Amino acid sequence: MPHSLLVTGGAGFIGSNFVRYLLAHDPDVRIVNLDLLTYAGSLENLKDLPDPARHTFVQGDICDRALVEDLFRRYQVDTVVHFAAESHVDRSILGPAQFIQTNIVGTFTLLEAARQAWLKEGIVPVEQARFHHVSTDEVFGSLEPHDPPFTETTPYNPRSPYSASKASSDHLVRAYHHTYGLPVSITNCSNNYGPYQFPEKLIPLMIFNALNGKPLPIYGDGQQVRDWLYVEDHCEAIWKVVCEGKLGETYNIGGGNNPANLQVVHTLCDILDELLPHSPHAPHRSLIQFVADRPGHDRRYAMDIRKIQRELGWSPRETLASGLRKTVQWYLSHPDWIEAIRQTSDLSGWMEKNYARRGGNP
Ligand code: NAD
């Protein structure tokens, strides 16, 4: 079983949920959390951790080879769970360079450090080591309405700078397994939602704006279809793969639902109407506004998750309805987190510039 974990990007949305999940569920692990604290990462996400003595935070860059190698040696790292990335498609369209640096060069740097520590220096027995890479369904491209869902063998067809950089990092991870025998695994997951998600992504953006009576911007016709997974289900699936998944293998993870974006926003509005019947902004659906579509916007993603279900016995616990309700309730009960994120991020400026650039509203 893994003991000494290097988690990268553990102050971001999924990474911080993973750290929290692991400290609560596995009493034997120690975690070193390496995060640069870009706009997307925040120590606010790591407040009130269960058993915090088993967690060490290090602010630093995954591209810093000397730092990463030092962490491997100092903490005798036997397991890497690699989340750190630039993760927002819109930002990758506006400025792709940082995506190439972090997602490709950063992953390469971590792989080289793991190869040095495990295969050359033998700081821990290699049979106890694993490099787990967290990736996305966006590497597979876009599906037509009647195409079958993505499987683990669907050819890659990334279509944005974000998904191309993630695809590239996936290929590097596999190449290090085949070329050097580095013990690796990969998961490709659909869209996540839940607590601590930075409010530039669809679901928290809609909740934030709805609570403030601001327009709810929907790209294009809102008929883009996605699979949605509650973040804690993702954390559980990753941990299953890290502990029991076959080395060199890829596992798809998803929620098994396929709503259109507009349908997700309608559901959120209905939950808010129900939980806040006296809100001056109810009915919240009246806040919906359609804005110019994202360039090259993928139409449909869907995930075939039968491999992880069959081999590792994992399935999502939350339905989309139950997960969305939990998420709205979490945001309503964490106004301090919302305020802290608002104050420490460039959120409002970025949002306004981005939507204005496309002629959208707000
Ligand atoms: P996020 O943007 O919320 O967090 C990314 C974290 O990485 C931040 O804390 C940031 O500070 C850190 N980071 C960025 N550059 C860094 C660097 N150079 N060095 C160290 N840390 C750095 O992202 P997320 O939504 O939590 O996604 C985490 C991972 O999961 C990503 O690899 C993403 O591709 C993947 N993923 C995300 C989703 C989703 O729906 N959010 C779905 C599937 C896969």
Image: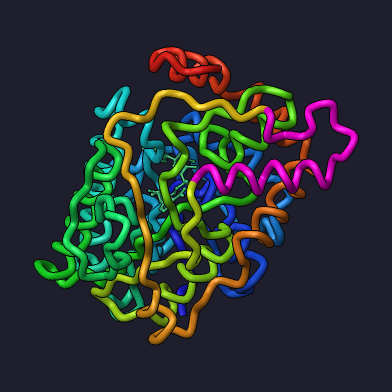
Residue at the image position 50 percent from the left and 56 percent from the top: 228
Q: Where the C terminus falls, by quadrant?
A: top right
User: Is residue 265 found inside the magenta-colored segment of the image?
Assistant: yes
Number of numbered discs on residues: 0
As displayed, is residue 91 above or below residue 80? Answer: above
| Foreground residue among 80 and 101 | 101
| Foreground residue among 240 and 263 | 263
Q: Residue 324 location, x and y as percent? A: 66, 53
332 to the left or right of 229: right
Residue at the image position 18 percent from the left and 51 percent from the top: 157
Colouring scheme applied when the structure was drawn: rainbow
Question: Which image quarter: residue 174?
Answer: bottom left
Residue at the image position 25 percent from the left and 36 percent from the top: 161
Residue at the image position 63 percent from the left and 44 percent from the top: 266
| Foreground residue among 262 and 239 | 262
User: Is residue 201 found inside the magenta-colored segment of the image?
Assistant: no
Would residue 136 be visible to someone looking at this image?
A: no
352 to the left or right of 63: right
Q: Residue 91 location, x and y as percent? A: 37, 28
338 to the left or right of 346: right
Q: Residue 162 location, x and y as percent? A: 30, 39
**Residue at far right of view:** 278
As displayed, is residue 76 above or below residue 340? Answer: below
Would residue 199 be visible to someone looking at this image?
A: yes
Which span is picked out in magenta? 261-286
The quarter of the rendering in which ligand 1 is drawn is top left
| Foreground residue among 79 and 94 | 94
Q: Residue 308 location, x and y as percent? A: 40, 78
As displayed, is residue 91 above or below residue 331? Answer: above
Secondary structure mainly formed by the magenta segment: helix
